[in-house]
Image (cartoon, rainbow, N blue to C red):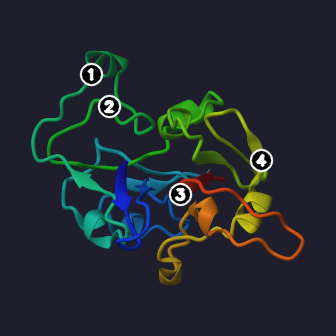
Amino acid sequence: MRVFRMQDGADTAPYWLPRPCFHCDDPPCARVCPVGATFKRDDGIVLIDNERCIGCRFCMAACPYSVRTFNWSTPNDPAAATVRGYSPEWGYPRRVGTTEKCDFCPDMAREGKLPHCSSACPMGAIWFGDENEDAVTNSHGETLRLSKLLRDRAAYRQLEELGTKPRVYYLPPDNRHYPGPGEAATTPGNQTSAVVQR
């Protein structure tokens, strides 16, 4: 997952913007894959089966978020990952000539764990959860109602107007959140994202 250093102006403080795969409800990458290597599971996670991928890179061209990468050379996989055997759920061992992307660590989700990006975030800024259960959790162990978090923090989705229905929401920094009538002002903070699966 790429993390971009952003700055709105010369006189404003920089902030960090993570950009994972958006695991769209209507993923254009899956529609253009000629061999069905990119697919969406019932829980909404979009995966790549690298044993089926032919490296045509149509999915890279179709993704409006530019979150896919291509393995031009042989990837350096950890030894433990190659022993485990291949599954699209953990994506190892990776292969030269195929595409890859953030996969929300579905093998960890199956065990009830947060994905690496969320569990390792020292600021607790990346939330992960289930829209059907209306709950998200961060690395600090805080669990909130997703609908309330999105409403109260004025969440938005990138390029929502394209109709891809991205499953990643961004929460504006606290210092850019303007309280409604009767709400207390918030203190400055970092940009955060709420990553959602179904």
Cα distance, mark 1 to mark 3?
32 Å
From the image, state whether disc 1 or disc 3 is nearer to you. Answer: 3
- Callout 3, which amino acid? Gln
At numbered mark 4, what does the secondary structure look like: helix, strand or loop?
strand
Cα distance, mark 4 to mark 1?
35 Å
At numbered mark 3, what does the secondary structure look like: helix, strand or loop?
loop
Task: Name, please, the residue furthest toward the left.
Answer: 73
| Badge 4 or badge 2: first in the primary sequence | 2
Q: Is residue 37 in sight in this rendering?
A: no
Marks 4 and 2: CB-CB under 8 Å? no
- The disc placed on residue 78 is 1
Q: Residues within 10 Å of mark 2 (few under 14, many from 20)?
A: some
Marks 3 and 4: CB-CB under 8 Å? no
Where residue 128 sits in the image (x, y, percent)? 62, 46
**Identity of the residue drawn at 76% across and 54% down:** 132
Residue that carries the numbered disc 4 in the rendered image: 144
Where is 198 relative to 61, above or below?
Answer: above
Cα distance, mark 3 to mark 4?
17 Å
- The disc placed on residue 191 is 3
**Identity of the residue drawn at 38% across and 66% down:** 7
Q: Is residue 88 in sight in this rendering?
A: yes
Cα distance, mark 2 to mark 1?
9 Å
Where is 56 relative to 86, above or below?
Answer: below
Q: Residues within 10 Å of mark 4 (few under 14, many from 20)?
A: some
Where is 190 relative to 76, above or below?
Answer: below
Residue that carries the numbered disc 2 in the rendered image: 92
In the image, 179 versus 125, the foreground residue is 179
Cα distance, mark 2 to mark 3?
31 Å
